[in-house]
């Protein structure tokens, strides 16, 4: 497997003009492979297996686990209105177009926002880079990224009626903070990443972190890459810890998290969730196809559909492929990704999980997705 993955990376990274990647693979028993190929940017130093990455939306699964810990404790419920806990979510409004002067028109949502709807991305919240309507709305309610004001936005659909990828998980994190009385990072340190030994997973963005961080790059019109020094999180002292995308981690650290899920909620003696909770998170919770996304900002993200030939489901934090994937993963596997082209999957039926970390934009370029597909084929020996 090790040699197959190296060959897959060397071939596909060159074809995609991506400078480097880190891959880790494991199963219930332990780590099977750790591989770093290439550099930390064009002409940069060689990548190492312990280099840090902005894992962006791979944060969502970790925050979802934190919320489900509080569900287990009876401190959060999946289906109650979150308005009493988070007043910003009371009486939600749906964006219903714009008037003749270009001002937003909203109407009351047909129902409340619940934790289950947030975890499944059926709350109605979206992302501006995927919604022309939200892009048009934002100048009427300007807010700096990473502030609480930036996640106070109208819904794009009534709760429970559509799968829309967006800021829902940021509100999951706010619910964790409201119930626990802790910053999200503190809860994770005490109850998730800390017990799992994920010492390099953090919301911090200090000089020590920056020194180990793989630089972010963005694609240029000629197909090259140039530095793009933005930070997807607000840092440890931000107004809120971004459950939707604020963590920095290593591929090695994230494999500990995915192996915990693979093991039904426990790893190396640390019990994070009950097996029945993990089983619920890994079961489809939505009645509509999930995981298909269109971009309103192509320099930031391409259109994305990991399984274009199937209607995927969504659990409480994960994409679920209902049938055999084309590159090896079995039905019922869990997966998602981060905007800077980091990816993971968890395949309980095959007892394997893998993490692939790159660090460039736009997300989901076809040739970059082929890196993921080639790694998957190498893992399964295809």
Image (cartoon, rainbow, N blue to C red):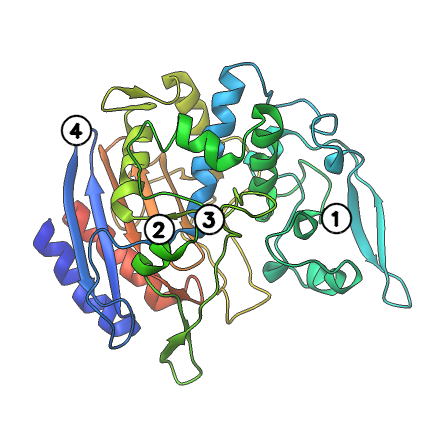
Q: Position of residue 37 (x, y in %)?
A: 18, 62
- Which mark identifies residue 154? 1
Mark closer to the chain start, 4 or 1: 4
Looking at the image, do the residues carrying marks 4 and 3 touch, with CB atoms under 8 Å apart? Answer: no
For marks 4 and 3 on the same chain, the one whose residue lies earlier in the sequence:
4
Q: Give me the C-alpha separation between circle 4 and circle 1.
A: 45 Å
Q: Residue furthest top?
A: 74
Q: CA gap, disc 1 to disc 3?
A: 21 Å
Q: Circle 4 is placed at which residue position?
A: 29
Whether pointer 1 and pointer 2 mark residues with C-beta atoms closer than 8 Å, the reply is no
Q: Quadrant of residue 54?
A: bottom left
Q: Which of pointers 2 and 4 lies earlier in the amino acid sequence?
A: 4
Q: Most extreme residue toward the front, as rendered?
A: 207
Residue 129 shown left or right of residue 336 in the figure: right
Q: Regarding mark 3 in the picture, which secondary structure is present there?
A: helix
Per the image, label 1 sits on a secondary structure element best described as loop
Q: Distance of mark 3 from mark 2, alpha carbons?
A: 9 Å
Residue 287 visible to the viewer = no
Q: Which residue is mark 3?
A: 57
Residue 305, position in %: x, y? 45, 55
**Residue occupying the far left of the picture:** 3
The tag on residue 60 is none
Percent across and percent down for residue 315 are: 48, 33
Q: Which residue is drawn at the image coordinates 30% and 48% (left, top)?
A: 250
Question: Pointer 4: residues within 10 angstroms few (<14), some, or many (20+)?
Answer: few
Residue picked out by circle 2: 343
Q: Residue furthest bottom?
A: 222
Image-based side of 241 in relation to 160, left or right:
left
């Amino acid at each position: 497997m090790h040699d197959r993955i190296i060959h897959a990376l060397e071939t596909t990274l060159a074809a995609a003009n991506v400078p480097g990647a880190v891959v880790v693979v494991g199963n219930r028993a332990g780590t099977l492979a750790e591989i770093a190929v290439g550099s930390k940017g064009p002409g940069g130093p060689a990548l190492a297996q312990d280099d840090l990455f902005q894992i962006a939306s791979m944060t969502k699964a970790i925050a979802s686990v934190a919320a489900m810990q509080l569900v287990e404790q009876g401190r959060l419920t999946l289906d109650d209105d979150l308005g009493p806990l988070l007043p910003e979510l009371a009486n939600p409004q749906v964006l219903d177009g714009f008037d003749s002067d270009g001002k937003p028109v909203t109407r009351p949502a047909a129902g409340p926002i619940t934790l289950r709807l947030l975890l499944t991305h059926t709350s109605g919240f979206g992302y501006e880079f995927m919604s022309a309507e939200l892009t048009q709305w934002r100048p009427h309610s300007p807010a700096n990224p990473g502030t609480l004001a930036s996640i106070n936005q109208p819904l794009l659909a009534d709760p429970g009626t559509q799968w829309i990828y967006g800021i829902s998980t940021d509100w999951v994190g706010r619910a964790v903070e409201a119930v626990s009385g802790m910053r999200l990072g503190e809860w994770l340190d005490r109850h998730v990443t800390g017990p799992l030994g994920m010492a390099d997973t953090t919301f911090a963005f200090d000089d020590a972190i920056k020194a180990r961080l793989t630089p972010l790059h963005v694609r240029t019109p000629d197909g090259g890459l140039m530095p793009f020094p933005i930070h997807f999180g607000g840092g440890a002292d931000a107004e809120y810890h971004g459950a939707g995308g604020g963590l920095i981690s290593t591929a090695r650290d994230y494999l500990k998290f995915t192996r915990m899920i693979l093991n039904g909620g426990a790893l190396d003696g640390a019990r994070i969730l009950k097996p029945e909770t993990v089983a619920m998170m890994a079961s489809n919770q939505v009645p509509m196809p999930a995981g298909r996304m269109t971009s309103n900002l192509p320099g930031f993200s391409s259109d994305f559909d990991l399984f274009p030939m199937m209607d995927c489901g969504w659990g409480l934090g994960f994409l679920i492929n209902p049938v055999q994937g084309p590159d090896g993963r079995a039905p019922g596997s869990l997966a998602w990704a981060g905007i800077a082209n980091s990816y993971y999957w968890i395949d309980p039926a095959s007892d394997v999980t893998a993490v692939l970390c790159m660090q460039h934009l736009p997300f989901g370029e076809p040739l970059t997705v082929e890196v993921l597909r080639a790694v998957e084929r190498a893992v399964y020996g295809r």
